[in-house]
Amino acid sequence: MVREDRGTWHAVPSERPGVLYDWPVDPLATATDGILRAGRRLGARGLISAGEGNISVRLDADRLLVTPTGVRKDELTADDLVVVWLAHPDAEPLSRSGRAPSSDLAIHLAVHAARPDIGAVAHAHLPASMGLTLAGEIPDPAALPETAVLLPRLPFLSLGVPGSDELAARVAAALSEPPAPLAAAVLLERHGAVAVGRDPAHAVDRLELVEVLCRTWRDALLIRVARTTIGTAALGIVEPSSPGTDSEGR
C-alpha cells in the first residue's frame, strides 16, 4: 500500500480508476478557501461595503470557522478567520491574527445549532433588500421563476437589534420551522438577508437570488409609478395587445 507524509497528513489508497492515492481533505483549509472566495464574490457583486457582512462554515460537530468583525470581507486573509465553539460558548475564540469574531456571531451559532444539515451561513446588507424593507415592501419569491423554485419560502423578520440573542433566535426559528422545504434564506427589515447552504458558495448563491428578487421588485414598482405619473406614451412604453387583436387594434 502506498503511503507518504505531507506534514501531519497521510496519503490513502484511492478508489478512483488510474489514481494510486489521494490526499485527505483538510476541513480547515477547505473552509478557509470557501470563506475567502465568498467574501471576494460578495464584494465584487456590490453586496457588501466597508466591514459589512459575515460568513461561517461548520468544521465539525463542535467548531465553526467565522469571519472577523471590523474587516472588509473581500480583503480577508486566512489569518483573519476565527475558530469558535458551538457547544462551548465560554471557550476562547482562536484567530492567528488575534481578531474577534463577527458581531453577528449569535446568528451563526443559533442557525448552525438549529440546522445541523447545513454547512455554511452567510449574511450581507443587500442594498436593494434594505431599500425595499425600509419602504415597507416585502417581495414575494413566487414573482420570479428562479426564486419560486430555489427560494420558495422567504420569511420576513421585523427589525431587531443587530448581534442580539433575540434576533438570532428569530432568524434560527425562521430557517428551521416546518413545513418542508425549510427556508434557505430570511429577509431582515433594514438589515439585508441571511442565507444557508452546503458551503459558502451555495449560501452566497441564495443571497444573490434574494437581491435579484428585490431589485426586480423595486424596478417594477418604479415603472408602475412612472407609468401612472407621466403616462405610458411619454415613457415610450407600448402596452401589450389583447389576445385576438392586431397592431391596429382590430
Image (cartoon, rainbow, N blue to C red):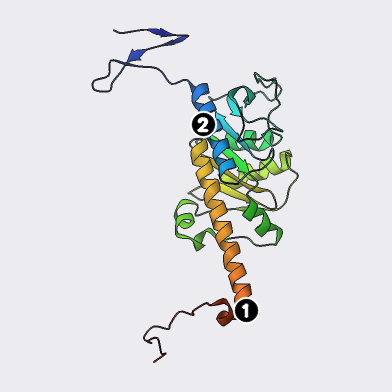
Identify residue for label 1.
228
The quarter of the picture where the C terminus appears is bottom left
Q: Is residue 219 above or below residue 128?
A: below
Quadrant of the drawing holding the N terminus? top left
**In which image quadrant can residue 68 be found?**
top right
x, y percent for residue 49? 66, 43
Residue drawn at (55%, 52%) of the image = 210
Instruction: Report the number of discs.
Output: 2
Q: Nearer the viewer, residue 170 or 47?
A: 47
Residue at x 56%, y 42% (from the top left corner): 44
Count residues near mark 1 (Cα–Cα under 10 Å), then give few for <14, some for 14-19, many for 20+. Answer: few
Q: Residue at x 57, y 62 (%)?
A: 217
Is 220 displayed left or right of 1 in the figure? Answer: right
Residue 161 point in image, percent of width and height: 76, 44
The kind of residue tagged 1 is: Thr
Q: Nearer the viewer, residue 90 or 238?
A: 238
Residue 34 tag number? 2
**Crowd class of label 2 (few under 14; some 14 to 19; many from 20; radius 10 Å):** some
Precedes in sequence: disc 2 or disc 1:
2
Instruction: Give coordinates of residue 180: x percent, y percent.
Output: 48, 49
